[in-house]
Amino acid sequence: MNDPNSKQKKYDFDLEDRTLEFVKRIIRLCKALPKNLINNPLINQIVRSGCSIGANYREANDALSKKDFLHRMRITRKETKETRYWLKIIVEANPDFSVKMVDLLQESLELKKIFSAIIDKSDKKAKQV
C-alpha cells in the first residue's frame, strides 16, 4: 500500500520519539547532578522546559488548524531554546559535567533548527494559500 502521507506520519512519529528520548536524557542528567541550592532550581527549570518540548510538539501534530499548528510549533521552538539555555547554565554550575552534556547541547540545537525549518516551511505554505 502506497500512502502518500506515510512519509509525513513516519517523520512525525520519529520526531515524537526523538523529543521523548531527549527529555529522558535530561532526566537522567538531572538525577546525576549533585543536589544543592544552585542545582535544585536549575533541575526544576530544565525538567519543565525539556518535558514541554515533546508535549507541545505532540499538541502541534493534533492541531485543529494551520494557525493552531504554527502557534504550538512556535511554543515548541521557544521551549527548546529555553532548555538549551538551562543546559548552558547547568554546565556553568557543574563544569565536571560539561563533557557529558556536549551531546545534549548538540541535540537541543538540532531540534531547534528542525522546529525552525518546520515553522518556516509551514509559514510559507500558509502565506501561499
Image (cartoon, rainbow, N blue to C red):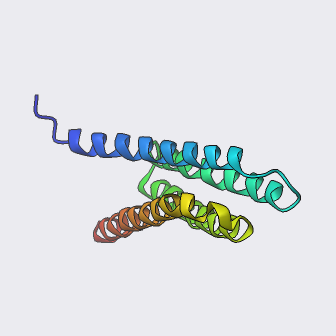
Instruction: Please identify the quadrant where the N terminus is shown.
Output: top left
Residue 90: image location, x then y, percent: 69, 64
Identified at 84% across, 62% down, the residue is 38
Relative vertical location of residue 25 with respect to residue 80 in this rendering, above or below? above
> Can the viewer see residue 23?
yes
- Residue 22 vs residue 59, the one in the foreground: 22
- Quarter-wise, where is residue 115 in the image? bottom left
Q: Quick one: quadrant of the C terminus?
A: bottom left
Answer yes or no: is residue 86 visible: no
Instruction: Count all numbered tags in the image, as a single digit.
Output: 0
Q: Find residue 52 and report its horizontal and vertical position in percent.
A: 61, 50
What is the residue that sits farthest to the top in this orientation? 1
**Residue 99, how many percent across, how many down?**
55, 63
Q: Is residue 81 left or right of residue 116?
A: right
Front in this rendered view, residue 84 or 121: 84
Q: Choose top left, top right, bottom left or bottom right for residue 122.
A: bottom left
In the rendered image, residue 36, in percent from the top left (x then y), is placed at: 86, 55
Identify the residue shown where x is 66% and y is 63%: 96
